[in-house]
Amino acid sequence: MVPGEDPQSKPESSERNKTLQAETTSAADTTLRDWVALTFAAGVGSRTAALLIDRYGSPTNVLEAGDRDLERAGLKPDSIRSLKSAEIIEKADREIAALARLGGGVLTLTGDDYPHLLRETYDPPIVLYSIGDLRGALTQPAIAVVGSRRCSTYGRNAAEMLARELAVRGVTIVSGLARGIDSAAHRGALDGRGLTVAVMGTGLDSIYPKENARLAEKIAGAGALLTEFPLETPPLSQNFPFRNRVISGVSLGVLVVEGAERSGSLITARMAYEQGREVFAVPGNITSAKSFGPNYLIKDGAKLVHTWRDVVEELPSEMKAAILSGERAEPKSSNAAAQMKMDEIALSASEKKVLEMLNPDEPVHIDQLLAKTKLQSGELMGALLQLEMLDRVRQLPGKSFVRRL
């Protein structure tokens, strides 16, 4: 005991501290609840909500403002009634509790964890929901990789290769968790043991497409899942343009790998231009409709990308210097290249023969491989299985195979 201390005062002091802590926690919870509640108000979109917060100082003050004052701020009667209803408060409480059970959290526009690049855009969401370590993922330079859902083998390989090579060098890969190019970009980043962020057009509990559920789990463990939509939001078509502005908003630039004339990837590129971001594109076959998007962007001034260096060259000078200096410090024969060389030496004659018959762009059916290699069926299947295990070939639907880049 401290000399002179009243032994009876300690319990009282302890109780006061507990009460103060409870009040502080309660105030923080109420503040967070009010941020979420504001997003549930009818007729109040992200831009209007941000303007109201700027006018009144906080979501709590918006919810407590008088009807006439809100009317002078430009809100319609239906929106004012919605703001004053107990329903949005109850809905916000349920949302926060359900997010906690899912392992997710809420990021508010003025919070420290909110992506600073997105905050600087014209109409950032006032609230984001995430699972994983978003803050950690975005401490690195981030590049979005987007493209066609129905991509070609060339596009999938290009997206995966570029994402992997950028991720290996400390660039976070951002994409939209969709089929095709998006999935390839996320997988490339994971293959490179790097960080990746999936921006969703649904709630965190509604993985779309469903076959990407396992991929989403891996992303949450090596980056983050991110959305502005509350739980139980289905994959409605009108959600995805909003998602696209977040994809470009959290990134330093957007790399387009395939996309038709009226594609979401072109919308993302346009939003990137509007947000002052760099736009990159991988050139494609001029006879393919999927190549219209990137080829058009290149003609319109986007940076043509052939290797990861083409992207890194456009990063802010400090980031670029850090990546390139690290690259120069590596020996000319990298670990990956050395491993590939060792794999080549370790291949059997039949495995080498199969690998020679494959290329990254044109799938070859197993019947064609049988005819070209002159191998027995069992020997061919064994060679293909071994090459898949070594990550040298990829099997496509319909028993066709391509060589991995």
Image: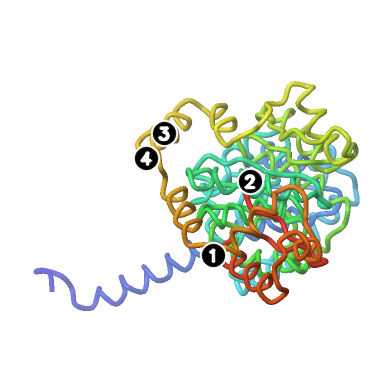
- Amino acid type, mark 3: Ala
With 88 as the anchor, is 331 left or right in this view? Answer: left
The residues bearing labels 3 and 1 have C-alpha atoms spaced at a distance of: 41 Å
Cα–Cα span, label 2 and label 1: 68 Å
Foreground residue, 41 or 402? 402
Q: Earlier in the sequence, mark 2 or mark 3?
A: 2
Tag 1 or tag 2, which sits nearer the N-term?
2
Mark 1 element type: loop
Q: Does residue 87 appear anywhere in the picture?
A: no
Q: Quadrant of residue 296?
A: top right
Label 3: state its secondary structure: helix
Identify residue type, mark 4: Glu
Q: Nearer the viewer, mark 2 or mark 3?
A: 3
Name the residue tied to disc 1.
348
Q: Position of residue 150 (x, y in %)?
A: 84, 52
Q: Is 308 placed above or below 35 here?
A: above
Looking at this rendering, what residue extends furthest in the left direction? Answer: 3
- Give the labeled residue for mark 3: 322
- Circle 4 sits on which residue? 330
Q: Residues within 10 Å of mark 3 (few under 14, many from 20)?
A: few
Where on the picture, by quarter, is residue 247?
top right
- In the rendered structure, which disc, 4 or 3, sits on the residue that comes first in sequence? 3
Write down the quadrant of residue 394 in the picture: bottom right
Disc 2 and disc 4: Cα gap in Å? 50 Å
Q: Nearer the viewer, residue 351 or 336?
A: 351
Of callouts 3 and 1, the N-terminal one: 3
Look at mark 2 in the image and give the residue it sits on.
Answer: 58
Residue 84, position in %: x, y? 79, 57
Q: Residue at x 35, y 36 (%)?
A: 329
Determine whether label 3 and label 1 are within 8 Å by CB.
Answer: no
